[in-house]
Amino acid sequence: MESPAVPVPLDPREQPILERLLRTRDALLLLKQDKSSYIKSRDVLPLYEEVIGQVEALNAVRKDQDQDHRHNRLDYVLDDCFQLISLLFLTVGRNNEAPAAYSLVTTVQRLLDHLAEAGFYSAKDLESIAQTLGTMRETLERGKDTYSPHLLTLLEKRLKKCQVSLNNLHKALEPLAPELAPVHETLVSILRSTSAANTRSKFSASEVLDLQERLKEVQNKIKEGNFVGSDGQILSGQEVVKPLWDRCWRWTEIVLARKGQVDDRFQEQYARLLEIRNQLERLSMTQAWSLRETDLFQFQRKLDRIDEARVSGNFIDATGQPADIHAQRTLLYLIRRSYAYIYALLIASEPVSEALLPIYNQLQTLRRCLVEVKDSGGVSNARELYPYSMKLNSIDNMRIDGKFYIGNDIPEGQGSINSLLAECYELAYELRAAVDEDKEDRGGE
């Protein structure tokens, strides 16, 4: 399941470009791996410029070549460089700049390809992706006068490809009547829940049997072979929902029969993908406190290589034989779930340098606490606000001339942190004002 063989560049003019990109990639990897200090913009920008210089050289070499040429090693190394630069831009808090979009757009394309291949997804899946594509288009528009047209053209092409894929997925759901959409959502959820149960460390037959009961409840809504509306009319979209119900039922039967045991031929791939999925799941729960965006690179690359090693969509064993339906679906579920975690982690990345994240996270926690206090009725006296006020003042006192410094540096994300600090102050003020107002009311009684 290692990466398939990648050909070397055939054009001798590409060889020096490859060698320079390999050196740049090494420098990017060293920067990613160095945890002794936080990453700064001035560390990343020269490496970005180096990569863009090589892209210009490569475009000059390939300008007369077939646009659909087969990818060689240079293309893979160039992709590595752009992925790393993108994740580094996120790490330094430059989320809203064009280079940061590269990693997200490639992950979105992977997700869309897998949704199309799987043939089942919910409208909510597509809503999130549509919103993300819209945000990325705005990012590229803002970057037109700042970043290389070579980068912007590359990103625009990928965005257009994603949009075409998304439109096709939307079309497949168009036949669904509004009354049938919730049934479809339920079936998608059941299919995914069955796959999740299938990959638990301890298989629970009762969990899958409960899902079968939910399927029976859906089946009970069928009248004379069709789902009907409140007016008794047959709802449009039967051809989408009924095959999905059948697929759900067959999958629960297969999972119950296999009891979470994957074919021995694919145990190695299963163990690797399970570990990736579990690590990403843990990261997603502690993301705000433990994630350095560049850490996602290793997961992306492992998944990409396993995904690309499939033959005609199938996982192949050491003798070239394809996986059975249980192993195939189980491995694909783990890949898709892992890409979904990466996507969620990327869109949750805050536009704040990793140097300022501890302060930002403290303010996020403080804001949540103040909102909860406000929503639960406020405080009975001003003393209850002292712990919040003291924390706010201690953070505010870190600023020099309104800025948070780390050594002599002013890391990115000042606006986000100052805005959050102001919001916390406003919440604390509202809570204190409510106490004073209550006192006045009682005094006037």
Image: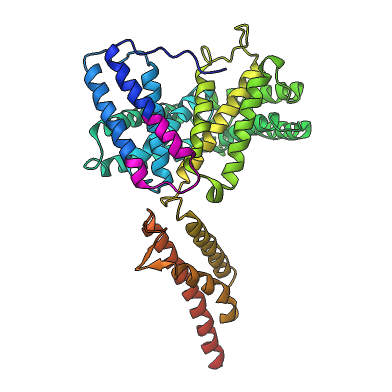
**Which residue is nearer to you in this view: 381 or 399?**
399
User: Residue 436: horizontal and vertical position, in percent?
Assistant: 51, 84
The image quadrant of residue 276 is: top right
Q: Residue lying farthest bottom?
A: 444
Residue 144 visible to the viewer: yes
**Which residue is nearer to you in this view: 272 or 26?**
26
User: Residue 170: horizontal and vertical position, in percent?
Assistant: 43, 31
* Above or below: residue 128 compared with residue 238: below
Kindly identify the residue that appears in the image at 41 percent across and 50 percent down. 351
Q: Is residue 39 magenta?
A: yes
User: Residue 211: horizontal and vertical position, in percent?
Assistant: 70, 33
The quarter of the rendered structure image containing the N terminus is top right
**Which residue is nearer to you in this view: 307 or 437?**
307
Kindly identify the residue that appears in the image at 57 percent across and 69 percent down. 373
Q: Is residue 101 magenta?
A: no
* Above or below: residue 14 compared with residue 402: above
Majority secondary structure in the magenta region: helix
Kindly identify the residue that appears in the image at 21 percent across and 21 percent down. 60
What stretch of residues is rendered in magenta?
24-45
* Above or below: residue 241 compared with residue 374: above
* Above or below: residue 201 compared with residue 239: below
Judged left or right of residue 45, residue 420 is right
**Which residue is nearer to you in this view: 198 or 232?**
198
The quarter of the rendered structure image containing the C terminus is bottom right
Judged left or right of residue 379, residue 54 is left
